[in-house]
Amino acid sequence: MPTNFEPDGDTCYTVRQVLRHRRAHCIEGALVAACALWLKGEPPLLLDMRARRDYDHVVALYRRGRLWGAIAKSNHVALRGRDPVYRTLRELAMSYFHEYHNEHGERTLREYSRAFDLRTLAVEHWVTGEAGAWEAERRIDLTRHYPLFPAVHGRYLSRIDEMEWKAKALVEHTRPEN
């Protein structure tokens, strides 16, 4: 499914709207994945990862045995899903750390949330509604978050190197020209 570059302004599509518009960005894709897992009898869980001076990233969570995995929508290959090999949500979030950087070459990932269960929301707020999934986005953002590392250690982070700049340019869908 193509990336939602939001040509008409900010969106937070519900599952129904994603299927209608046939495009999604990370939270929209995570909602679709969580809904699919729910239809298969698994809990619809999301993980929010916060970044400093960058976009956050939201993924759908699943477990196989005692290990966590993620289903993710991203235009960048390194920010996609993860196989279920992580013992904790922190481990899973850390697997995104080195590949998460902004346009200035800074490593930006800072926090991860506890698992957010979408069953706490009415289905119109994330599956069937036509007003968007803004309430789901708001509630996920309000979920308790934990630092990936002490803030003081941010000064020790390296900037991305030349090879990482090249990898950053590798995207599945190019932004359409206006």
Image (cartoon, helix red, strand yellow):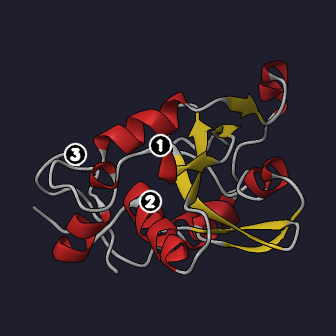
State if disc 3 and disc 1 touch (CB < 8 Å). Answer: no
Distance between the alpha carbons at the discs numbered 1 and 2: 10 Å
Distance between the alpha carbons at the discs numbered 3 and 2: 13 Å
Instruction: State the image quarter where residue 61 is shown.
Output: bottom right
Q: Is residue 17 left or right of residue 2?
A: left
Say what amino acid the circle numbered 1 marks: Tyr
Q: Closest to the observer: 150 or 104?
A: 150
Evaluate whether residue 177 shows in this view. yes
Evaluate whether residue 47 shows in this view. no
Q: Closest to the observer: 42 or 146?
A: 42
Q: Could you tell me which secondary element the residue under label 1 belongs to?
A: loop
Q: Residues within 10 Å of mark 1 (few under 14, many from 20)?
A: some
> Which quadrant of the rendered structure holds the C terminus?
bottom left
State if disc 2 and disc 1 touch (CB < 8 Å). Answer: yes
Say what amino acid the circle numbered 3 marks: Asp
Which residue corresponds to mark 3? 10
**Mark 1 or 3 closer to N-term?**
3
Which residue corresponds to mark 2? 26
Q: Nearer the viewer, mark 1 or mark 3?
A: 3
Residue farthest to the top?
152
- Examine the rendered structure and indicate whether residue 76 appears above or below residue 100: below
**Mark 1 or 2 closer to N-term?**
2
Q: Residues within 10 Å of mark 3 (few under 14, many from 20)?
A: few
Q: Residues within 10 Å of mark 2 (few under 14, many from 20)?
A: many
Instruction: Identify the residue at image location x=78%, y=21%.
Output: 151
Which residue corresponds to mark 1? 55
